[in-house]
Image: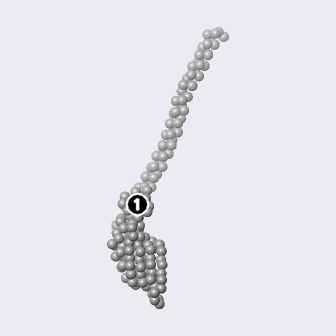
Amino acid sequence: MTSRSILGIALIIVAVGIAIAGTKPFWEDSQALVSRKTELNKTLSEIQEMRKLYNGILEKYKSIPEEDMARLNQMLPDSPEGALLLVNVENISKVGGVKLQNISLGASSANVADSGSGRNYGAISVSISITASYESFKNFLRVLEESRRLIDVDQIAFSSSKINSYQFSIQAAAHFKGKK
């Protein structure tokens, strides 16, 4: 072999080495981009599945009859509606057969923010004092439970004043939807 052929082979090897070294960063970048594209396609598929799920839920929501939506809005109104709550408790006491002594509403508070709808949910504290027999009190609680307004009874205290007549103090919370 001549020195020219050795030099030619050496130059070819150097050229191949330079080509490989020069294109390696571009190759790695293209592989990273292919990997990123795969991740984005997977994310896009997940988003499309969520969109289908959302559309299904929205369709079910829209299929709820107006009468049922009205009942749901009575159960969980948009605001505390304190005056209406007082009237409801008074009517419940009449139906329940108890004597309403006192009712007071405390401050309303926002409890939880629903991340899906952006709506805050809140509660208004309610203190109720009644006089009744034990059976009438149980009936009052049953009617309160069956009422359309969502009310949680947190605490009940009682004392005896006469035979078969008790003073009951109830601490409760009436729930409502807040603003978006």
Q: Is residue 88 left or right of residue 30?
A: left
| Mark 1 Cα shell of 10 Å, populated few (<14), some (14-19), many (≥20) | some
Is 57 placed above or below 6 here? below
Is 10 placed above or below 110 here? above
Horizontal and vertical percent position of residue 165: 45, 87
Identify the residue position indicated by label 1 in the image: 120
Quarter placement of the C terminus: bottom left
Residue pushed farthest left? Answer: 83
**How has the structure been colored for display?**
one colour
Horizontal and vertical percent position of residue 170: 44, 76
Residue pushed farthest bottom? Answer: 163
Horizontal and vertical percent position of residue 37: 49, 40
| Number of marks | 1
Of residues 159 and 35, the one drawn nearer to the viewer in this rendering: 159
Residue visible at 41% across and 64% down in the picture: 109
Residue visible at 59% across and 19% down in the picture: 14
Amino acid at dot 1: Asn
Residue visible at 51% across and 33% down in the picture: 30
Residue pushed farthest right? Answer: 1
Residue 101 picture quarter: bottom left
Q: Is residue 77 left or right of residue 50?
A: left
Q: Tell me if I can see residue 31 in this picture.
A: yes
Residue 150 picture quarter: bottom left
Q: Tell me if I can see residue 150 in this picture.
A: no
Of residues 52 and 29, the one drawn nearer to the viewer in this rendering: 29
Residue visible at 46% across and 87% down in the picture: 161
- Which type of secondary structure does the marked residue at label 1 adopt? strand
Quarter placement of the N terminus: top right
Horizontal and vertical percent position of residue 114: 43, 59
Residue 113 picture quarter: bottom left
